[in-house]
Amino acid sequence: MSTSTTTTPAGSAIAPRRRRADDVAGLGTARAGIFVAPALILIGLFLLFPAIWTIWLGMTDYRLTGLQAASPEFVGLDNYVEALTDPSFWNSLWLTLVFVVASGIVGQTLIGFALAWSVRNIHGWVKALIEGLVLAAWVIPASVASFLWLVLMDRRSGTLNGLLGTDGYAWLIEHPMEAIILFNIWVGTAFSMQLFSSALSAVPPSQIESAKMVGASGWQQLRDVIIPNIKGHILTNTLLITLWTFNTFTPYLVTAGGPNGKTEILSVYIYETAIPGGQLGLGAAISLIMLLINLVIALAYIRVSRGRKKA
Amino acid sequence: MAGINATRLVKEYPGGVRGVDEVDVEIIDGEFFALLGPSGCGKTTLLRSIAGLEAISSGQLIIGDRDVTDAEPGARGVAMVFQDYALFPHMDVADNIAYPLRIKRVKRDERRATAERVGDGLSLQGLIERRPGQLSGGQQQRVALARAVATRPDVLLLDEPLSNLDARLRLEARTFLKELQRDLGVTTVFVTHDQAEALALADRIAVMKAGKLQQIGTPREVFQRPNNTFVAGFIGSNPMNLVPATVSAGSIAIGDGVSTALPPGTEDHVREGQAVVWGVRPEYLRWTTTEEPGAIAAEVSVVENLGASVLIAVNVDGHKLQVVVPEDHEPAPGDRGFVVPTGSKTLLFDAESTERIG
């Protein structure tokens, strides 16, 4: 056991221990290790192990039922070949891209910023009301939110049809992709709004006023002062929104991937393959591909943000 | 170039609090004008009202020959330097200086040339391609000044221009500002809470308190003939001694058996028994150990060293007076002696209205 204590003079039990700079708590490695162990074990059990297990599963023909459920066989990279040569995989990836760009990057980011921008000078109950409503969409459980949208867009006696007088129009069948895009914007905009709200309040007022003093228009203030000041926030927001939207499964609760696979984004596609389809091995392989795409997005972000700091 | 004329200017906040209360002020073309007062007195609000950053509640503001009471900040011919300089961190010095020109759609080459010329004039040679983060406080301030004067404004507004600099740099910047203002001849209004700064820089000073003007005058006027006890106490590096007293038999009774002569010119404006405040600056009191005509008996309680002189606090019949004593003659605490006021430099205020008498 390596402790950071030095020899204490005999008889002075309360002599202060000298601590190493990286040992702020003064516990020593072993004792500190015991304290973190429970957390590490939990992380290993529920995060690390499943991840490794998925890699293994992805290289077997493991199925939910039947012979291969009892004794799966190692098939090497067959699952990956199958996934990458299947047009439905590429279709799903394309749908995911559309979904991420439209609902995440464009929808949530732009609407979130617009909301944050328009309430920044409002105070009192109006602001609290708007923020409360937007946040409510974010905090209510996904199952409740999706039920609300089902009720809204229901073919018979749906709220939307009632409002528009288009009784009998099946929104979720005619416009399924638009529906889940709007749904996801509705659910997730609160995050961007909150993030941009705090970013905007951190822009020094004197910089904005300096621009005003020389006659800069609202748009010029935005371009020359606000956006350069909150660039880092925009980047962070875009990364988080991209990853979250990429990985979200909630649209399944609204359209179940249908009709006819038209809203089968990648997370839904994996679920359809692995659980109802029973092909756990193939599902695991696609999961790993998805994880790799996530990593690429995150790495691209780190690159951009590093380049920004250097500049 | 233009003068500024404010008439009954009011800035009222929701809730009825007045940041600026019925202020009348005329600032002459080319003048270096100080708004002076303690924090919260409304001096910055008045400056921001002139800039157009605060909407004026009532009254009229004229710059040059234009009524700009409701004009946009960018349409007043006014430039402002903020206390924190408000440089854009993502632009280099040249882009910062030329930013007003960019808004005015001046061509890039011309902007660059102007930025370099103005920068040179403010000793920013060689720094033109740096970011604000790579500059010292004094350099940042000069960039902010350069940005403000790049468009040749009619009026230059400075919000606490020296407060973000350290003490040594402040003296340098003070001289620098005064020279710059004289060279440009631009009407300049600056806000400060430091009376020494106002006295040193300004052609005229407006002293404010609680949104109201207390006095407008040259540094000499506000120093020598303050309108009321507030201005008297606020101006001067050592606050003026203000002693409650009564007019008695043609002189001022400070306490039991202690009295001093009425300041010249006040004899006809006081009545017997009137409650007054006698004011005398510590610099205009002389400490002596020998009794002489007009001397007031006193006992030294505290001695503070000011370097070339000593500030002593003396006790005169229960009142505390401060006296500046030249070095080499300093008394010790507990010493008894006399203070002699320079008669022509003493002032008298009415105890009730606090206004100066005479």
Image: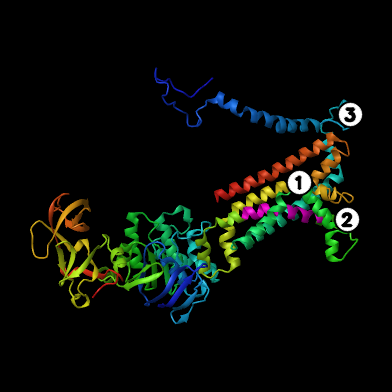
- Which SS class for mark 3? helix
What is the number of the mark on residue A248?
Answer: 1
Amino acid on which the number 3 mark rests in the picture: Gln
Crowd band around label 2 with a 10 angstrom C-alpha radius: few (<14), some (14–19), many (20+): some
Q: Which image quadrant: the C terminus of chain B?
A: bottom left
Name the front one of labels 1 and 3: 1
Q: Is residue B170 visible?
A: yes
- Above or below — where is A262 with respect to B48? above
The subunit letter for the residue under badge 1 reads: A
Amino acid on which the number 2 mark rests in the picture: Ile
Q: Which residue is mark 2?
A: A173
Residues in magenta? A179-196
The disc, 2 or 1, on the residue closer to the chain's N-terminal end is: 2
Magenta run includes residue A216: no
The subunit letter for the residue under badge 3 reads: A
Crowd band around label 1 with a 10 angstrom C-alpha radius: few (<14), some (14–19), many (20+): some
Give me the residue at 88% from left, 29% from top.
A69
Crowd band around label 3 with a 10 angstrom C-alpha radius: few (<14), some (14–19), many (20+): some
Q: Position of residue B105 (x, y in %)?
A: 55, 71
- Which SS class for mark 1? loop
